[in-house]
Image (cartoon, helix red, strand yellow):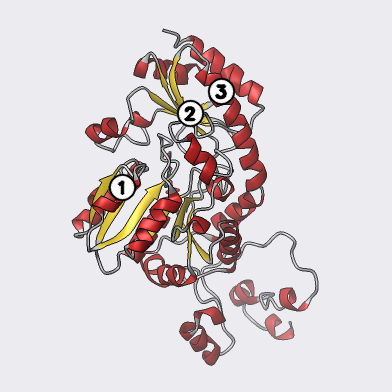
Amino acid sequence: MTSEKKLGKATQAIHAGETQTSVAEKSGIPLLPPIYQNSTFRFTSAAECAEAFQDEESGYVYTRWGNPTQDILEEKLAVLEAGEAALATASGMGAVSVALLTALADGGHVVAMENLYSATFQILNEDLRRFGIETTFVDATDPTQIERAIRPDTKVLYLESPTNPLLKLVDLRRSAEIARAHGITSMIDNTFSTPCGQQPIPLGIDVVIHSMTKYLSGNGAVIAGAIVGEKAFITRAKEGALRNFGAVISPFNAWLTLHGLTTLPLRFTRHCENAAHVAAFLEAHPAVAWVRYPGLCSHPQHELAKRQMDAFGGMITLELKGGRGAGENLVDQLQLCSLAVSLGDVRTLICHPASTTHSHVPAEIRHRTGITDGLVRISVGLEDVEDILVDLEQGLESCTP
Ligand code: LCS
């Protein structure tokens, strides 16, 4: 302290009080993991610094390489997904990109589900194609289509289940077996289901991808993503595509997501309960042509849903008898449910995929895969379900043909 008093004001303002030995030396661990909101880490000797550059497990260097807040989040997610390791990213699309760039480092071919989140479809159909990586899109609800599309240079099988927005399911155990038999890395975007709805890794899938923007953070406050898989794959992703392309999560977003995850099981149970009520209500409504929800007996793959899912989730897709006009009337009338893209929020969100989330998918492909112009997608929130039903009832009055 005496020596600090001799320093100039500018030096004091920067350095005084920053020894930070107290946290390590005093008892009392913060109950809530703190945010390490810093870009870089300092060392006490050249040898220690050089060691950290050689052996990354030995210390933190720079937040693009790793940060304690990110690590806590990653450990929690790896446990929840029953994976060896996890890697947090700046967004769900950051996670999709890092996973694909890691598995396709030497080029190759991808077999993918034809009904995917639109930006993922664009990466595969346009961006990677420009770099010479081709994708064959198949209806992966039929495993024989996966098998038929595999080529000698296929490196990745890319899946979503339930899909966005049609809630189609893929048999994960069967798909993983096919991929393994051909030495291909299988990946699934588990955003819609979360590890509370299904755990793909114990079913044999190699890599799980998340947009943590949705259920995992649950608060509607962050954009974040993650991949989960074997330690060797995650390390390659962390030391390669993530670090070099730079889709790193900020410590603050990692911290917000970390706290979101602590209530995921409770929130997801309530999302599922509310969604089951809303799906049953919609199915019985005269203005509704059909409803897709994996928990409904009318879902064409309900038996598969019961087999591979622990819970059916909070997402519902429906088609109104009045088509696109009726859909627009519905979203205009709703008062409690918000007209917004994204999903997995505590609030009920409703959107029209053909004009929003999937508007960049060519109309021909949208129609072939079943994303009709009258399709409406609901992310059922955590409000009292009676209030959601009252709002939908009054909204649907304007749609009755
Ligand atoms: N994967 C799925 C299944 C998604 O639904 C989304 C975003 C992403 C990845 C990308 O995640 P992000 O980079 O936004 O964190 N889905 C959105 C949606 O359906 N409406 O708005 C965004």
How many numbered marks does the figure carry? 3
Mark nearer the viewer, 3 or 2: 3
The residue identified by callout 2 is 350
Q: Residue at x 66, y 62 (%)?
A: 34
Q: Amino acid at mark 1?
A: Thr
Q: Residue at x 64, y 81 (%)?
A: 7
- Residue lying at the far bottom of the rendered structure: 47
Q: Amino acid at mark 3?
A: Ala
Q: Is mark 1 within 8 Å of ligand 1?
A: no
Q: Residue at x 25, y 36 (%)?
A: 365
- Residue lying at the far right of the rendered structure: 27
The residue identified by callout 1 is 144
Alpha-carbon span between mark 3 and mark 2: 17 Å
The earlier-in-sequence mark between 3 and 2 is 3
* Residue 334 visible to an observer of this rendering: no
Q: Amino acid at mark 2?
A: Ile
Residue 126 locus on image (x, y percent): 23, 49
Question: Is the C-beta separation of discs 1 and 2 under 8 Å?
Answer: no
Please tell me whether residue 14 is drawn above or below residue 214 in the rendered image.
below
Which mark, residue 280?
A: 3
Q: Ligand 1 is found in which quarter of the picture?
A: top left
Alpha-carbon span between mark 1 and mark 2: 34 Å
Mark nearer the viewer, 1 or 2: 1
The earlier-in-sequence mark between 1 and 3 is 1
